[in-house]
Amino acid sequence: MTNSRNEKGFTLIELIIVISILAIISSGVAYLVTTISYMDPFKAATMLNHTMEKVRIESMSKTEKSYLYIYNKDEAIYYKVSSNSDAERAGLDVESGTKLGKGINVYYKEIDGVETKLEDDGTICVYFTKSSGAFASDIEYIRCTARGKQATLFCVKETGRRVIN
């Protein structure tokens, strides 16, 4: 008497091993995609540029002035639009701000100043005049850097316009 079974298919162990390998590979890919998107200085400069334009339009059209705060908390860069001119009362924290990116370094230069790195708990405040939309703050440029790449947001004080290079 022979016990003849036609064994087709996978065993449970083989299925568990394949699923484990796929989970490891997919988590690695997800990590790389997240890391790359967090460390894109051009994307960070573009987000700041769009937010600056929003603040500029709000400042010219509303009775209340708007301020853009760019700040560093827990080694990550955030930005927030506020109607409060005092950074301490504007509520600059991790929960209320929009994350610009982790791994991004931000440098800025004020007119006739030196380039300064935005350190932890540091703040940059950008605001515009109501009448013309020109920069009321003295920022000459804001530079975003990550992994050897950089994007610089040049600010034209007289017009309130910006150029990304």
Image (cartoon, helix red, strand yellow):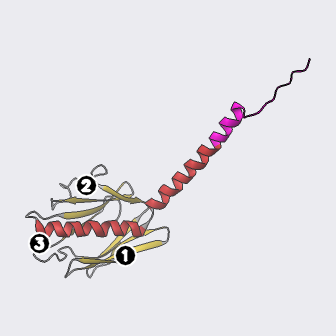
Tell me whether circle 3 and circle 1 mark residues in contact (CB < 8 Å).
no
The residue type indicated by label 2 comes to Leu
Q: Which quarter shows the N terminus?
A: top right
Q: Quadrant of the C terminus?
A: bottom left
Q: What amino acid is found at the position of numbered circle 1 in the picture?
A: Thr
Q: How far from the left and from the top, in percent, is residue 147?
A: 49, 67
**Of all residues shown, which one is farthest toward the top?**
1
Which residues fall within the magenta stretch?
A: 1-20
Q: Which residue is mark 1?
A: 152
Residue drawn at the location 25% of the way across and 62% of the way down: 69
Q: Would you place residue 20 above or below residue 70 in this image?
A: above
Classify residue 31 as left or right of residue 38: right
Query: Does dot 2 land on a helix, a strand or a loop?
Result: loop
Disc 2 target residue: 92
Question: Which comes sooner in the sequence, label 3 or label 1?
Answer: 3
- Residue 141's image quarter? bottom left
Mark 3 or mark 2, earlier in chain: 2
Residue tagged by mark 3? Answer: 130
Tell me residue 138's x, y (percent): 22, 76
Q: Secondary structure at mark 1?
A: strand
Foreground residue among 161 and 8: 8
The answer for how far apart the CA atoms under marks 3 and 1 are is 25 Å
Q: Amino acid at mark 3?
A: Lys
Examine the structure image and report whether residue 163 is included in the region drawn in magenta: no
